[in-house]
Amino acid sequence: MPETKISVAQGDITEFQGDAIVNAANNHLILGAGVAGAIRKKGGPSIQRECDEHGPIRVGEAAITGAGDLPARYVIHAAAMGDEPASRDSIEASTRHALQLADENGVDTIAFPILASGVAGFDLADAARIMMTAIHNYLENYESGIEEIVLYGYSADDAEIVRRVVEES
């Protein structure tokens, strides 16, 4: 199995040209603000309708929907917060569950925002480190068909912080 490439991109994750994007979701799967709001606005109402069929889920879990009008095929909703505040455990578990859903659905390329670093207020670098640990643990312990994982920073400064974390890991 070829090694999974991990890279960093700067910009709007809703424009990712790949199989799946990850939504930094709440466990009720309500597409409100931040990344979720951008997904709702650009992807159209079908994504929220599918979320309504899946939710609520537990904090630390993930759900998969179609991507509506987005260029990706899927949106994987990783619930790192909601009925409970974001934590190391919820970021780690929702990252792992998102990767499992990606593998179960034949995803080759997947893009993640840094979970819990927006509305939930988690420190960006800390959240990125937790995610990188979860990603490495997943890739070491499961047979994954994912070819590329892209971590997004919305601003140039955010992307640079994420790039440093990825290089350190």
Image (cartoon, rainbow, N blue to C red):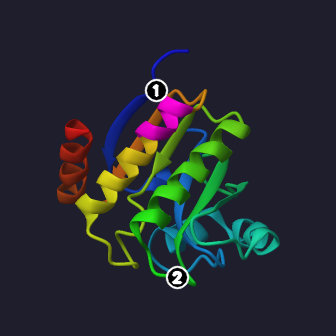
**Upstream in the sequence, badge 2 or badge 1?**
1
Residue 4 numbered tag: 1
Nearer-the-camera pick, 29 or 142: 142
Residue at left offset 74%, top offset 74%: 55
Mark 2 or 1, closer to the camera: 2
Amino acid at the residue labelled 1? Thr
The quadrant of the picture occupied by the N terminus is: top right
The quadrant of the picture occupied by the C terminus is: top left
Q: Position of residue 151 (x, y in %)?
A: 38, 47
Is residue 16 visible to the viewer in this orientation of the structure? no
Tally of marks: 2
Q: Which residue is mark 2?
A: 84
127 vs 121: above or below: above
Which residues, given as a range, are shown in magenta? 136-141
Q: Residue furthest bottom?
A: 83
Instruction: Name the quadrant containing residue 126.
Output: bottom left
Q: Residues within 10 Å of mark 1 (few under 14, many from 20)?
A: some
Rounded to the nearest whole Å, what is the CA distance between mark 2 and mark 1? 32 Å
Q: Position of residue 128 (x, y in %)?
A: 32, 54
Q: Please give left or right for residue 103 compared with residue 92 in the image.
A: right
Q: Residues within 10 Å of mark 2 (few under 14, many from 20)?
A: few
Q: Position of residue 24 (x, y in %)?
A: 50, 65
140 vs 61: above or below: above
Q: Please give left or right for residue 75 compared with residue 127 in the image.
A: right
Residue at left offset 40%, top offset 79%: 119
Is residue 70 visible to the viewer in this orientation of the structure? yes
Look at the image and say whether residue 86 sits in the magenta stretch: no
Residue at left offset 53%, top offset 41%: 110
Secondary structure predominantly adopted by residues drawn in magenta: helix
